[in-house]
Image: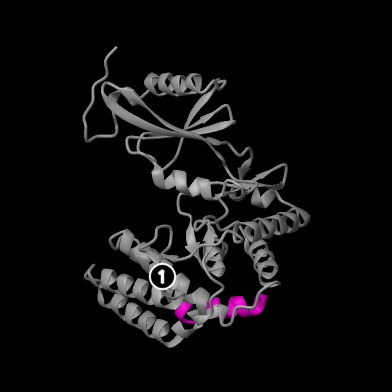
Amino acid sequence: MRYKWMAHQITIAWFGGCMQELYIREICKKHKMECGKITNIAGRFDLGVFNVDDRYVIRTSRNRMLDEEIKYDRIKALKHVPHLIHASEFMIDGSRIYYLILDYIQGLELLSVYNNLTPINIHDISMSISEFLNNLHRIKGNKYDIGHYIPIIPNHDKSWKVGHELYWDYIYNNVTGLQPDDGLVKLLKAADGYFKENVSSLDYEGGPVLLHNDFHFKNIIVKNNAFAGVIDWECSQYGEMDFELIHLLHWSLYPPSKDLNMTVMFNSVFREQMKSREIPMIEKRFTIYMLEHDFMQIVWSKGNKTDEYMPRIRSWLDGKLEEYVRNIM
């Protein structure tokens, strides 16, 4: 049987419907893995991500996923993470397809079960999350990667502060390039003033540590009301440990549903993380990180998320975040 290819397209005829299952089964057979139920799950990889029997995750791509291989290799000694089992390739009609096989962490997204948890469950999961982060942050790096989700400034060999000054310049220039209206221009200038006035808060450095860098309630897995693991490591990079908490904080303050109040868990994790370290002016550091995050959302959306993020940015500049952090310290 032959399959139609369009070299530049990824929605390839052979990788739809039955062909998906056929080739995932061939991959399993190659590695002597049992293969029953195959489910196509959401993911960032260009040919698909597949759950096999709630035991394995198979990620497929037309490009070698070397960056992902490196990232999973960095966490191979950790517990409660997916471990890379195989990284290989196969040929179809002269075209090469790459794949990774990972452990599947059984359980449910914390976000989906949060409202069913008891206060004791929340406390115990919070302690487990903090212990997990402590173990993760023992993995040291030599340089910083600066950016949310992806390193806008990778392998930065100067200070954390200088890296974020460069990052802010990048953000400022890109927001300006969107030809924003007067309201966004005014907000950007106010944020620029806040950044320049408070950037000295980034002088403190503990040194580069490995970050998950997308650490929030959908990427934390629980099973039987207990912490089970952390998934989706494609954004991991090196940075200051307090930068790790920013996504968890953002989701706590702006949950995807109004019936979710996840601040209790964030507060517990934050306090536990701060027990062994004292970071000066952390409330100002968090505000800078959040301003960077929200303006980058506007940049990535090419301005389409301006209305969504402008009220949040105003609240940071009005001191909402500083007050919140001071109250839980």
Vertical relation: 135 (above or below) 185: above
**Identity of the amino acid at label 1?**
Asp
Splitting the image into 4 quarters, where does residue 222 fall? Answer: top right
Of residues 309 and 145, the one nearer the viewer is: 145
Q: Is residue 235 magenta-colored?
A: no
| Residue 139 visible in the picture | yes
Q: State the image coordinates of residue 302 (x, y, percent, origin top left).
A: 28, 60
From the viewer's perspective, tell me whether residue 78 is left or right of residue 199.
right
Vertical relation: 160 (above or below) 137: below
Q: What stretch is highlighted in magenta?
A: 316-329
Q: Is residue 318 magenta-colored?
A: yes
From the viewer's perspective, tell me whether residue 190 is left or right of residue 261.
left
Vertical relation: 130 (above or below) 310: above
In the image, farthest residue toward the right:
120
| Residue 232 visible in the picture | no
Where, quadrant-wise, is the C terminus in this rendering? bottom right
**Dot 1, how many residues are within 10 Å of its Cα: few (below 14), some (14-19), or many (20+)?**
few
Q: For mark 1, what is the residue?
A: 157
Vertical relation: 310 (above or below) 10: below
**Colouring used for the render:** one colour
At x 53% / y 79%, what residue is drawn?
Answer: 204
In the image, farthest residue toward the top:
1
In the image, farthest residue toward the bottom:
197
Say how many tags the image has: 1
At x 65% / y 55%, what residue is drawn?
Answer: 132
Q: Is mark 1 on a helix, strand or loop?
A: loop
Where, quadrant-wise, is the N terminus in this rendering? top left
Of residues 306 and 178, the one nearer the viewer is: 178
Q: State the image coordinates of residue 291 (x, y, percent, origin top left).
A: 43, 72
Q: State the image coordinates of residue 123 (x, y, percent, origin top left).
A: 74, 59
Name the main secondary structure of what is drawn in magenta.
Answer: helix
Q: State the image coordinates of residue 80 (x, y, percent, origin top left).
A: 64, 46
